[in-house]
Image: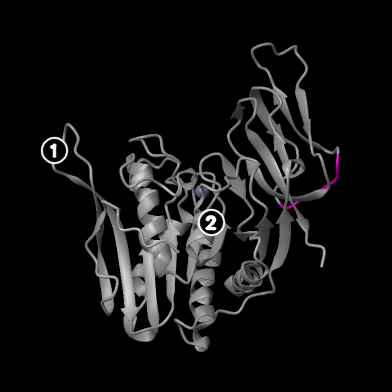
Amino acid sequence: MSDDNRSRLVPEVDFDQDGKQCGFIRLFHSVHASAYGFIPIPIVVIRNGPGPTALFISGNHGDEYEGQVALCNLARSLDPMCIQGRVILLPMANYPACIAGRRTSPLDDGNLNRSFPGDPEGTVTQQIAFFIEHVLLPKADIVCDLHSGGSSLLYVPTALMKRPDDVRRFESQLAALRAFGAPLAYITSGGHGTGAANTLSSAAIRQGPLALGTELGGSGTLTPVALQIAERGLRNILVHLGILPASMKIDSEATRILDVGGSDYFVYAPDGGIFEPVVELGETVKADQLAGRIHFPETPWAPATEARFARDGFVLCKRTPGRTLRGDCLFHLGTDRVP
Ligand SMILES: [Zn+2]
């Protein structure tokens, strides 16, 4: 666990004060239109006495909306008198990206979830990453980082965790993943474009708290079903930690847990053109089955290129925009865990 106080960000809240505090983390950013101004990253701290700390983050990518709405609802509804311990909400982690409705920041093109451990003297996105890793994560017993497919992907709503090397940590995270109560969840081994040591889940392994994530939907919008899964999951995590009483648990079916492994789980566009998916989310597919075609309307007489699945699996995620470049992710699969 790091005790690094080099962050230049200034929180308006006192993390050790009881009650509900709402304010901003000030990230000073001197630019042409605002000489002494700061970027106001919203934060809510809800605390009642000693106890565990849950850190809930959304807006790590600014074009993923389900988590941002779930944390707005939780910020308003959670009564400090009903909890024991502390809940920290960071609904717009990459604030400039969230305001722009983009995956990455318009200020420095930074992808926050590829920026850890960050840099206290770096770009805006690197400074945010540094603050989360070195100030927020060391305070937390668990961090939930709420993602979805964003602008380019659509997921079956899932909770997820990255597979840690440590067996005890694996079992603790798996228990939290089941407690979240999503109908579907997956365990990822990381890599293959999904980030490695520079993601928030890797930062959590370095700093100590258990880490869960989600992929709640995407396509640049949100659905009632995905929002309900997120809100139930967050509440159940608070019960799992003992921050909320057991009577507040929201019952759910047992979670079906899949594995997401290496490159054979992913299908990438073999050419640039228009993507025609030929399977849907939630389908079970076989190795060598046709996944989609890439069409070339500039030369309509040219045959479409085929993209095929490399292995059997369950379709967790698909690309949504039609216009596609070679190398774009078209699908990824999950497989049922072997007990
Ligand atoms: Zn994301």
Q: For residue 321, what is the image quadrant? A: top right
Is residue 334 in view from this perspective? yes
Q: Is residue 293 above or below residue 176?
A: above
In the displayed structure, 61 sits above or below 230; it is above
Disc on res. 201? 2
Residue nearest the viewer, comparing 142 with 287: 142
Which SS class for mark 2? helix
Magenta stretch encompasses residue 164: no
Q: Which mark is residue 35?
A: 1
* Residue 284 belongs to the span the image colors magenta: yes
Q: Earlier in the sequence, mark 2 or mark 1?
A: 1
Q: CA distance from mark 2 to mark 1?
A: 35 Å
Range shown magenta: 282-287
Which x, y percent locates residue 316?
69, 51
Crowding around mark 1 (Cα neighbors within 10 Å: few <14, some 14 to 19, many 20+) is: few
Q: Residues within 10 Å of mark 2 (few under 14, many from 20)?
A: many
**Considering depth in this image, is 258 or 196 the residue closer to the camera?**
196
Residue 115 at x, y percent in the picture: 45, 44
Q: How many marks?
A: 2
Amino acid type of the residue tagged 1 in the rendering: Ala
Quadrant in which the C terminus is drawn: bottom right
Residue drawn at point x = 41 percent, y = 38 percent: 110
Q: Quadrant of the N terminus?
A: bottom left
The answer to whether residue 284 shows anywhere in this view is: no
Q: Nearer the viewer, residue 107 or 307?
A: 107
Amino acid type of disc 2?
A: Ser
